[in-house]
Amino acid sequence: MDFANQIILVSAGLITFAIFAGVLSSRIGAPLLLVFLAFGMLAGQDGPGGIVFNDFGVAYFVGSFALALILFDGGLRTSRQTINRAFGPSVILATLGVVLTAALVGLAAKLIFGFGWTEAFLLGAIVGSTDAAAVFFLLHLHGLRLKPRVAATLELESGINDPMAIFLTLALVGVAVHGQNVADIGGALDLVWDFLWQMLGGLIFGVIGGYAVLSAINRLQLSSGLYPILAGALGLVVFAFTQTAGASGFLAIFIAGFILGNNPHRATTEISRFSDGFAWLAQIIMFLMMGLLVTPSALLPILLPALGVAFFLIFIARPFAILACIWPFKFTLRETAFVSWVGLRGAVPIFLGTIPVLSGVEGAETLFSVAYVIVLASLVLQGWTVPYAARLAEVELPPRPAPSRRVELDLPAGKGKSVVAYTVDPMSLLLRRGVNRLPLPAGTTVISVMRDGVVRTEGFDQGVEPGDVVMMLTSAEMIPTLDRLFGARRVRGQTKEAGTVDFLLDSTARAALVADMYGLAFEPEERELTLEEFMRSRLGKNIKEGARTRVGEVELIALQVSDGAVRQVGLDLDPPPRESSLSQVRARAKGGLRSLKELFIADPSGPF
């Protein structure tokens, strides 16, 4: 009884102190995951804590459980837009990229340590994949916002490349332990079949399991607190069943989370928050346990050569693999360099390092120690510098306004619909001069507006004032747009992501209708035009996608242009600072489509 109480006390104390240490470390910019790992080492047998933990079997079990929960949460938060933006480069990086990285690191390990070829390539396989947990948390913890395709590539790559690393590790362990010969045709075919089943099986079970989880959540009538538990439990069932079938359970549970997160379902908010909390707990436990597992004194004899392998991985192997894999996808050189730099290694290589030890591979303890040093070097060197690298590579975007006063409620039979309430910020976009209506995204309905304790359920076209509480019915995908509308405007001097708009408008809509709906200050003669005609009158016949024209304090953007006609128009309520008058004259005169007189009539806010 006392022993059980001590275990609970020590476990809870370690988690609590790790969180406090993480809060303090954030003030100096230290990666939170590195803090958890270091705290585990300090609590271990060589540190002040003196806790002796050397059970690789328990570490493998807990690591599998924790990684599955982290990937499930990662799938929940991966949108279809992420898949659409980065499917091609991410899949290539998650397969060919891992193989190239493992091969190059294996060559370096052979030269530096003198390992046998099997052991050298086994080390390469162990550290060949980026860590989903490290990437997800380090990119989002401090609100770092990147260019959409860059962020999508990094997140999707880290979410789906673990199966390849696990497959390579298990295959090379089989070669090392059982002497499997992959040089003959039979051995090679077995390896290819095993790989195909790992990938295809994980995909098939993930899709089937994901829709089964979705169906169960939407059909069962439960207390709202039980839905998150049901989602997590069913996700683990998908993982375990797929693993038992010999396929990749890690890929399956990621796909199951993705399907659940991208389809309407009950208890959306509860499941999201519960999964986020459990993913944090799993992350803390996994890094603390991996920190306890290593003996720092055992790292000293191999520290320098291990750092040599780590630097080779960071500065040569990863950049070469990235350049070879994504050059066909037209990433800029700066974007390619940043994707290369964010090849973060975390708990997964340490977790994979336990497999050779459990399988009895000769020299497995050395492989585990080297992998540990590589992870430490990656978290210190790369993890500490991700924000600076983003700014240097010019892939960082301004943070979105934080909706600090948003309350969100799921409907009892919500199916993706939520009731949200916002307190209007004094610097909200809705309070801009000239916007006297409530311009809300499609599918959003205002339920009520409360001002000074009085609830108003009609007359919403009169606009809102600071401090008003606006309650609306909306869908989950519209919440980011509402966050931006009700949040504070961006700080003066901040850059803005190219192409960012607040609303999409039909180019065939009459300007008068749009003006009445959104409070735009069109000239009287312009109100009778369609938006397409208005854009032509302002910008000429040869309109390019992304071309902008200002209407009062807002801007209209030509988002889609085909056959010389504007098909879709975007409305930007908070446009970048306008160009100088001379720049406007030069830009518009270049087209030769409007006279100087027409220019200043259409833009009465010009210098004259």
Image: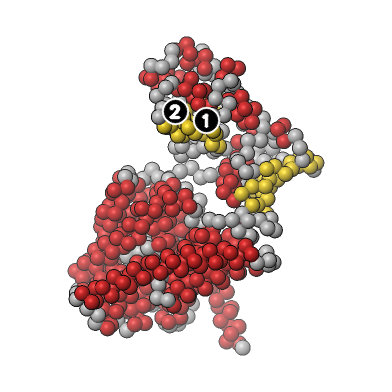
Quick one: SS at disc 1? Answer: loop
Pointer 2 residue? 565
Q: Sequence order check: which comes first, mark 1 or mark 2?
A: 1
Residue at point 66%, 35% (across, down):
438
**Which of the two residues, 366 or 264, is positioned nearer the viewer here?**
264
Q: Which amino acid type corresponds to the residue marked 1 in the rendered image?
A: Ser
Residue topped by disc 1? 507
Q: Quadrant of the N terminus?
A: bottom right
In the image, what residue occupies the spot 43% across and 45% down? 147
Name which residue type carries label 2: Ala
Q: Say which quarter of the image contains residue 483.
A: top right
Residue 383, image quadrant:
bottom left
Q: Nearer the viewer, residue 525 or 207?
A: 207
Q: Quadrant of residue 265?
A: bottom right
Taking the view exactly as shown, the residue that stands out farthest to the right is 454
> Residue at (43%, 58%) from the top-left corner?
135
